[in-house]
Amino acid sequence: MQTYKAPLNDMKFILEDFLNSGTSNFLLKESELEIEDFNFILEEASKFCEEILLPLNQSGDKEGCTFDNGIVTTPQGFKDAYKKFVENGWQSAALDKKYGGQGLPYIFNVFFDEMITSSNMGFGNYPGLTGNAFEAINKSASEELKKLYLPKMATGEWTGTMNLTEPQCGTDLGLSKAMASPQKDGSYKLTGTKIFITGGEQDLSENIIHLVLARTPGAPKGIKGISLFLVPKVIPNRDGLLGERNSLACGSIEDKMGIKSSSTCVMHYNDAKSWIVGDLHKGMKAMFIMMNGARLMVGVQGLGMSEVSYQSALYYAKERLQGRSLSGPKNPEIAADPIIVHPDVRKNLLKMKALNEGIRGLISFTALQVDVAKVENDKYKRQRADDWVALMTPVIKAFSTDVGSESANLAVQIYGGHGFIKDHGVEQFVRDARIAQLYEGTNGIQALDFVGRKLPMHNGRLLKSFFHLVKEYIEENAFNYNLKENMPHLMKSFGRLQQTTNFLASKGLYDPEEGAGPSTDYLKMFALTSLGYIWVRYIDIANKKMNDDPKGFYKAKIATGEYFLKKVLPETGSLMSSILSGAKSYTKYENEYFESSFN
């Protein structure tokens, strides 16, 4: 069965122990919160997810969204759930106070998005994209547009979307054909078709605010000619009240593999009235604000799917009786032992748990840097925070969603044949988790961005900052008794990462394919090493807290970390071997060879 309880103990550990360097407390003070207030809000958020959203997950998947002559209806119960979501103020929680938000630190969004995804990923796409659209408008639009649109988006009365993809272009947005023509009143008339638009049409909100990439007449070719436009479904009057319907329509919704309760729309714009966001021909700069936020959100979705997969598999492993422990019966009074006694089941469960807790720390540390970059006055500290977020965004998006998909499949494996049928609900996790590896830029694209753009950016400044952080930590803790058995694992993987980085940098100078070819392996290697750094810090913290551990939380943290360092982190060795062997075995492979076995 689909089982989920928000991992509040781990979230509190991250906030109070792992991130408690003074910075996190400062950010809470900025929001006029004490740590107790923040924890209370998290507890209330968890109740909403567990009691309202989780019960709708399987039914929403079974029913899906329906389409009838341009009208999209969400599954039964979704409209009431969204109404409660809005009335409770959840949409506004981490948004700018100036336009109706509550101004909570971004890390709240990360924790809450994880809870929402674990409970109901399809539902979460509607408010998640609204928050990202809010940020893009807030940072790039005119004050007039911000005052008119953002307050209603902050409450959730109006939702937001992002419109990038067209039938002929996905990642290569320079091929976009949508056209926006300027009008005398300063607005534009926008015409074109966009596909794969999440929440492009739905019955949850009274208005939908579309952010659409389009060209203007005479614009430069390629990506340099793209501008960003705000296109409301219903055009508001100056007083904020809804006016006339805009000339746009949903042509159809996609019949998808997963997230069936999230409407994925084909949108047609036919001289739709629109307004430019940001500067002319600078649309990608404005849209990247939304895209980068969305990519972090998708990374959180990967974690959320991995967490609910883990918890559901753990529940089943403790309940399902099958066979006996190889070391002798653990429950001789009953016919068989629960399958959690079997080594392979335990290994799979522990892999999910270790990855989840490590990724949660990496995402949270990155979320903290998002907040630091907003409030820090020191330009060098602000730059370091921005650099960290830029570097880690593709890593989090790609690695976390790969783990989400892997964990969903491991859950099915633990359930056995019962996982393959729909009754228990874990096969839904496999279908839902898969999209996170694809949208907001496939994970292959994330790896190319990471190796091709982020690593050399600013003469390697972003990467050097990460290397310096880890190297400094290793040196400072060289004689830390608590880490004497664990630090060598991090040191070995960190050394491998440095050697592999130098290899890729030198190869890429004379052959771009040699640099780009192993990019997915390199991103995974980088992610695992990053988690190794997180886990060593966790273990050090837990050892110092062992005298106050009545429920064994810190003891469990140490044991989980030791598993990760000994059993998961060593994969960096095989990844290094693969990368150092070069890319020619596939980049120089003749195209006709692909068909040699059947042509």
Image: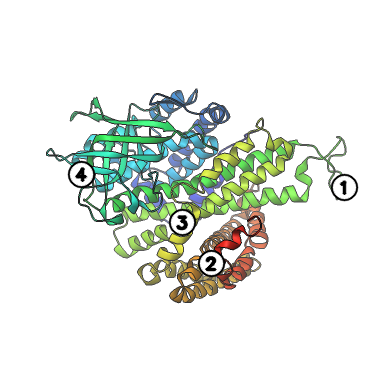
Question: Which residue occupies 47% across, 77% down?
Answer: 506
- Residue located beneath label 1 in the image: 328
Residue drawn at x 19%, y 28% as measured from the top left: 239
C-beta proximity under 8 Å, tags 1 and 4: no
Nearest to the eye among marks 3 and 4: give it. 3
For marks 3 and 2 on the same chain, the one whose residue lies earlier in the sequence: 3
- In the image, residue 474 sits, relative to residue 276, either above or below, namely below
Residue 587's disc is 2
Q: CA distance from mark 4 to mark 2?
A: 47 Å
Viewer-side label of 3, 2: 2
Name the mark on residue 445. 3
The type of residue carrying mark 2 is Thr
Circle 1 sits in a helix, a strand or a loop, which is it? loop
Residue contact between numbered discs 3 and 4, judged by CB atoms under 8 Å: no
Q: CA distance from mark 3 to mark 2?
A: 17 Å
Q: Earlier in the sequence, mark 4 or mark 2?
A: 4
Residue 588 makes an appearance in the image: yes
Q: CA distance from mark 3 to mark 4?
A: 32 Å
Q: Nearer the viewer, mark 1 or mark 3?
A: 3
Q: Which residue is mark 4?
A: 142
> Looking at the picture, which amino acid does disc 3 mark?
Ile
Amino acid type of the residue tagged 1 in the rendering: Gly
Residue 234 x, y percent position in the rendering: 27, 29
